[in-house]
Image (spheres, rainbow, N blue to C red):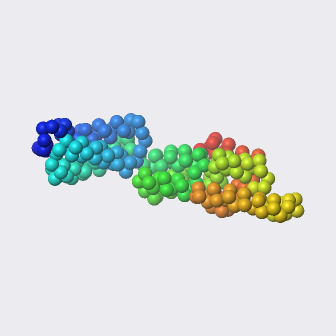
Amino acid sequence: MLMVSSSSVPACPPPPDRAALREAALGHLARFATTQHGLEQVLIRRIARWERAALKAGADRDEVAAQLAALRPLIATIAHDMVQLGAVDDAAFARARAKRLTRSGRSGKAVQAHLAAKGVEADVREDALLDVVEGFSAQETELSAALVLARKRRLGPFAGLPRLRRVESTLNEESEEGRLHALAERQKALGVFARSGFGRDIAEQVLDMEQEEAAMWVERLKAES
């Protein structure tokens, strides 16, 4: 039993047992979708809260450490149990999250990074990205996501600014100062796409697209993803 160093401090809370950790897992899953790794992190935070409370109450640090060592194997076991029950499904999570992020204008690289941070395995991430939009190739999916970003940031066909189109087309129409400004604006827009994980070819295609075609791609993405 954990010993408290002083009667003046709060009573030391008992460590969570298997039943308490399972209840915490079910409570989280009732509110949030997550991965097996994500659920394990939730339970790790649960026992970390107990650790802080126990130490604050004056429990012996070595005894707390021993309790933690005994609790940690339960975390993987409970998370695995949730997978077996179907309450946790990394593939389903990855597909749903990939669709949502793509529709919000995230690049394939950004989606990959997000899923990796959630503990989704590489092959599951790849499968999820292949299944984002029915009937779309990977290139078409990336283009559509980039167009969503362009609409959010008012770039290219959604900017109402012809100077963001190919600079070469303005050579005979604008002054040298205007051409340089157009080039700077276009480079700035390309930087937005690059920082978001989109390739140069996709960014160029977006910036040169007519608004009607761009709107069509965005609507198709919404309808088919």
Q: Residue extending furthest front?
A: 8
Q: Nearer the viewer, residue 132 or 11?
A: 11
Give how far across and how far down residue 144 sits, in percent. 65, 50
User: Residue at image x 63%, y 56%?
Assistant: 192
Q: Tell me: residue 205, above or below residue 28.
A: below
- On-image quarter of the N terminus: top left
* Visible residue check, residue 84: no
Q: Nearer the viewer, residue 11 or 98?
A: 11
The structure residue drawn at horizontal position 64% and vertical position 41%, both measured from the top left corner, is 223
| x and y, in percent, of residue 81 in the image | 30, 45
Q: Residue at x 76, y 59 (%)?
A: 181
Q: Looking at the image, which is closer to me, 91 or 62?
A: 62
- The answer to whether 211 appears left or right of 60 in the picture is right
Foreground of the two, 164 or 223: 164
Q: At 34% from the left edge and 36% from the top edge, which residue is drawn?
A: 27
Task: From the viewer's perspective, tell me whether residue 15 is left or right of residue 208.
Answer: left
Residue 217 picture location, percent across and down = 69, 47
Name the image quarter holding the C terminus.
top right
Q: Is residue 3 left or right of residue 147?
A: left
Report x, y in % for residue 136. 63, 51
Image quadrant assignment for residue 139: bottom right
Residue 51 visible in the snapshot: yes
How many labels, in total? 0
Q: Is residue 123 left or right of residue 69?
A: right
